[in-house]
Amino acid sequence: MKLSLSAIAAACVFATSASATIFYAGVAESSGEFGVWSATSAKGTGLPGRFGVDYSFISTSGIDVMVDQNRVNLFRVAFLLERMCPPSFGLGAKFNETHFGYFKESIEYITKKKGAYAILDPHNYMRYNDPSSQPFSGSVIGNTSDPTAATTAQFGSFWGELAKRFADNEKVIFGLQNEPHDVASSLLVSNLQAAIDSIRRSGAKNLIIAPGNSWSGGHYWTKGGADANSNWIHKLVDPLNNTAVDIHEYLDQDFSGGHLACTQDPATNLAGVTAWLKEHKLKAFITEFGGSNTTACVTMLNGMLDYMAQNEEYIGWTAWAAGMFLSRPFAVFQLQTYERIHQDMLTILLFQIGPFWGPNSPCCTDSAQFGSLEPGSKAADGGPSLYDTIWLPVIQKKVPAKLQWSGLASVNGGTLSTKGA
């Protein structure tokens, strides 16, 4: 985000006088993007889908536990653009109002009922019109050589409308897009800038978080030649200077979050993006990270959480992932092998084709069914889930005793307090 000279001066004062602080901490809620995967890439599969059967957004009881017992103040709630703006409408300001109503109800439960903050997460990889084989299906937004692609202007129009609807809720944070990849960085920045411009024209002052290219991977931020995120993302201009950077960082061999073993040291791999953030006086959230319950992963997760707490460039985080886990017949995960960050980097990701997580793991288990970070979830054998083996003994201990519980979400944070104080 390009800053004015006065803003840069103010930021320099802040940087030299403030200590590192995490203002927002919590978990990603993954369920709203479910139910559309097709083993045959059948376009339109699961759309619009049945709310509460094929997909959902949150479990209110899970949110209650996370806020009241675990004392977190941030949830990243995923949804699909194709459900909010059906392909029959096209991407833009016309919404499926029934679907939006379900989404708004979930966001207001988090922000108004529980007093926490919520990141709106269009989980679309900067693509639109066909999520049947995400993260690769669908047309790249703004690709003028693809006549089926939504335009940059349509992406901006969508965000202007969504922002207008949440502009009076200072606890809503606008996450512009999940994990853009294989997009020219110039086009990515054009799309993101269109969204920022539309959000601010709507009158919304809410905090915005902008992703990078190449899956928004922190370890790859300064790599990739001319298209490297470090050459582009700081060019975004927010007239309110209330835009932070959205980073993802997993700890396994290929940074995918698909494997049991943790081999990638977070402090080493985040050094480049942290230096870039410092250079441009920017703040960041890490909205996806995770690890299994192996000894190495526990060590690295502790190291990563400590790293964020010790570097003032990081103001918030959400671990991947919680989400609905209702007991019902659960479709098997499909494995999709593909190139993720770079040509020599092969990744296996898990794609869910049925409703909710069940005993399956959203992260870091080589597809073993160890459960999720959702409170009350269980592994396939009925034993402890990742909530029991990772959240409670590891991540929970790193949730700051004081977080921001009131006021506008901001790159500068707000007043810190305990819940209810």
Image: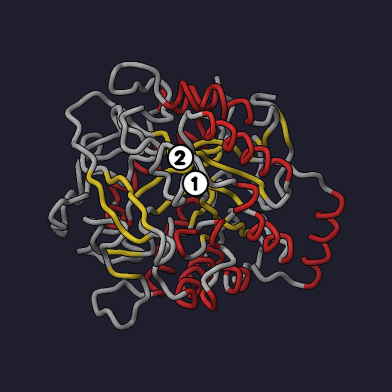
Tell me if 27 is positioned left or right of 344 in this view: right
x, y percent for residue 364: 41, 38
Residue type, mark 1 in image: Tyr
Q: How is the image coloured?
A: secondary structure
Dot 1 alpha-carbon crowd within 10 angstroms: few under 14, some 14 to 19, many 20 or more? many
Mark 2 element type: strand
Tell me if 62 is positioned left or right of 283 in this view: left
* Cα distance in 3D space between marks 2 and 1: 10 Å
Q: Residue at x 60, y 53 (%)?
A: 269
Q: Residue at x 43, y 27 (%)?
A: 386
Tell me if residue 368 comes above or below residue 235 in the rendering. Answer: above
- For residue 246, which quarter of the picture? bottom right
x, y percent for residue 80: 32, 52
Query: Of all residues shown, which one is farthest toward the bottom?
Result: 145
The residue beneath circle 1 is 250
- For residue 334, which quarter of the picture? top left
The residue beneath circle 2 is 320
Dividing the image into 4 quarters, which one contains the C terminus?
Answer: top right
Q: Residue at x 56, y 35 (%)?
A: 116
